Amino acid sequence: MTARKSKICITEISKRPVCPKIVRSVRNIIEREGYIDCNAEIREMKPHEGILISLFFEVEISGSTVQGSKKLNIFVKRLLPDQNMSLFDLPEAVRKEAFVYEELFKFLAEAQDKADVPKEDRLITPKVYETDAEYVMIENLTKQGLTTLDRKDVITFEFAKLSIQALARFHAFSFILQERSPDYFKKKIMTLKLPMCIETWIGFARNMYNFAATCLENEVREKVDKYIPTSYEKYARYAEDPNMTRCMVHGDFKLVNIMYKMENNAITDLIPVDFQTIHYGCPIIDFLFFIFTGSDQKFRRNHLETLKDVYHDTMTNYLKYFNIDVNKYLSRADFEKMYREKLDYGLMLTAHLMESGNCRL
């Protein structure tokens, strides 16, 4: 008796030809997920606002397996070919993100399972299907009801709290790696460099401030003008200060890189995404970046001290699941010292990025 041949149909719906490697990855996923018959559509998605450096695709696979019908929806982010951006090493950024999704998060999942960390205390990450030097393919979280805030949206304390908790666990994961796999940590984490050329970034920040300063009142501008020249050289020192605790940091922890789901007026899921700027640096920079790009003065006045407590308490409790004392890596005293010494990073961000709408006054 001759076995029935599988029927696999892949359709491309795109203004331009889909990268053949992506098509091959779709075939790999179809085979790995056990499809017997299926239809797969690869659709190009509308690009995000801003500088276009990536293409986005949605892959929908529906068909039958030996267990019954099955449907997958996958999000693909691919670096546009032949892209050159002086501010960032784009190919390296894609390789970093692939490393996080393909390697680090597998280690994280195994560690959390082994430590029996309950769901409410876990760092939640998206399912990864395929990665490449040019693209990543992860589960399409929007199809599960998750979305992002716009950079100009007003955040709630609940959103900020859950985001800071996720950030604390991400930083704590770095300490878990350092504790459990010191050789791996030295080779793979401590070698993660800043994703940008500092000299180019300083030029960018200076141009942004010069443009934005025209909107300031004269008295305010005079004060800020005195501070700005001293701020440019602080970026690299603040990010890579060898005298401070360092760990694996996100590097772009802001509203549009945090997906969440609302049910019955409450956030039920929150997942950080977009790890292209991951590097070995100072954890307080992630904290301050989120606060100053996502909140205004009123919010900070009402909630900043509480969110500092949330961050360190969450890290302390998360590390306990792995029998690690937080004081070995980041005591509360060290955290407060970092915060005091680098708090003006928030002012730097506000002054340099306010024209772009990424910072709140």
Image (cartoon, helix red, strand yellow):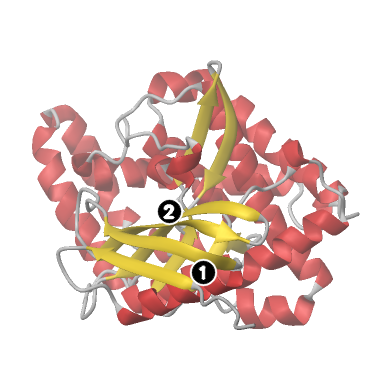
Mark 2 and mark 1: Cα distance apart in space: 33 Å
At a point 59% along the width and 38% down the height, the residue shown is 164
Question: Which is nearer the eye, 115 or 163?
Answer: 115
Q: Give the vertical position of 155 relative to 284 (above or below).
A: above
- Say which quarter of the image contains residue 339: top right
Which secondary structure lies at badge 2? loop
Dot 2 or dot 1: first in sequence order is 1
Q: Residues within 10 Å of mark 2 (few under 14, many from 20)?
A: some
Q: Amino acid at mark 2?
A: Asp
Secondary structure found at label 1:
helix
Q: Position of residue 323 (x, y in %)?
A: 91, 54
Q: Quadrant of the N terminus?
A: bottom right
Q: Residue shown at 26%/72% (left/top)?
A: 18
Residue 27: x and y in percent read 46, 75
Foreground mark, 2 or 1, reads 1
Q: Characterize the local packing of mark 1: few (<14), some (14-19) or many (20 or more) Cα atoms within 10 angstroms.
A: many
Residue beneath the point at 43% across and 65% down: 276
Left or right of 332? Residue 12 is: left
Q: Which mark is residue 252?
A: 2
Residue 310: image x %, image y %? 67, 33
Q: Nearer the viewer, residue 79 or 307?
A: 79
For this view, does 105 lie left or right of residue 74? right
Which corner quadrant holds the C terminus? top left
Q: Nearer the viewer, residue 261 or 289?
A: 261
Q: Is residue 249 above or below residue 346?
A: below
- Which residue is tagged 1? 30
Query: Mark 2 and 1 residues: CB-CB less than 8 Å, in contact?
Result: no
Residue shown at 52% from the left, 48% from the top: 272
Q: Nearer the viewer, residue 203 or 223?
A: 203
Q: Which mark is residue 144?
A: none
Amino acid type of disc 1? Ile
Q: Is residue 1 left or right of residue 151?
A: right
